[in-house]
Image: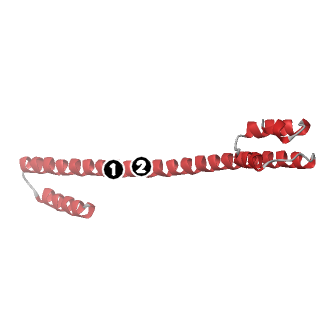
Amino acid sequence: MRKMLLGTLRTWRVVLLECQDDEERRALMEQVQKLVEEYENRLREEAHLLGLNEGERRGLDKGKKLGLDEGKKLGLDEGTRAGKVEEARRAVERVLRRRGLAVSEAQTAQLADCHDLDALERWLDLAITAANADDVFG
């Protein structure tokens, strides 16, 4: 499109240079001015569309990065929490075993199925001084 417009403008220039009549020259200049304005408007539209496309791309890229960062943080938080739960579960088992307290299969299953860190920490505190496993798991 740009090459075509440049060719058209060059043609108009030649025509204007050859034109002897001032009235005709003025009319031709108005036509050239209209062509230039149309071209400028098309360029603005193209620039606007390019800007919108670039803005959309940047927005998507930023959204993806934020999503990935948030996903990593959530994964890390979840992994940290799961690790704390597992460590608390092992600590309860270890204290019960070291103290020689008999744990039933139901209590072992209850301990294995527990994912509540507060409950596990409470059981750990109870396991330190409990007379038996029933005192821990209630």
Residue 129, image x, y percentages = 91, 36
Looking at the rendered structure, the kind of residue marked 1 is Leu
Q: Which residue: 57% across, 51% down?
A: 68
Relative side of 129 to 119, left or right: right
The numbered dot on residue 56 is 2
Q: Which residue: 84% across, 41% down?
A: 133
Q: Which residue: 83% across, 48% down?
A: 93
In the image shown, does 52 or 22 lie closer to the viewer?
52
Is residue 118 placed above or below 92 in the rendered structure?
A: above
Relative side of 53 to 43, left or right: right
Relative side of 12 to 105, left or right: left
CB atoms at circles 1 and 2 under 8 Å apart? no
Disc 2 residue crowd, few under 14, some 14–19, many 20+, Cα 10 Å: few
Quarter holding the N terminus is bottom left
Looking at the rendered structure, the kind of residue marked 2 is Glu
As drawn, which residue projects farthest toward the right?
99
Residue 113, image x, y percentages = 69, 47
**Image quadrant where residue 16 sits:** bottom left
Which mark lies nearer to you, 1 or 2?
2
Q: Which residue: 11% across, 51% down?
A: 28
How far, Cα to Cα, is label 1 from label 2?
Answer: 10 Å
Instruction: Look at the numbered disc 2 and give the secondary structure of its residue.
Output: helix
**Image quadrant where residue 15 sits:** bottom left
The numbered dot on residue 125 is none
Quarter holding the C terminus is top right
Residue 105, image x, y percentages = 76, 50
Residue 24, image x, y percentages = 7, 50
Instruction: Look at the numbered disc 1 and give the secondary structure of its residue.
Output: helix
- Residue at the disc numbered 1: 49
In the image shown, does 107 or 17 lie closer to the viewer?
107
In the image shown, does 36 or 69 lie closer to the viewer?
69
Pick whichever of labels 1 and 2 is earlier in the sequence.
Answer: 1
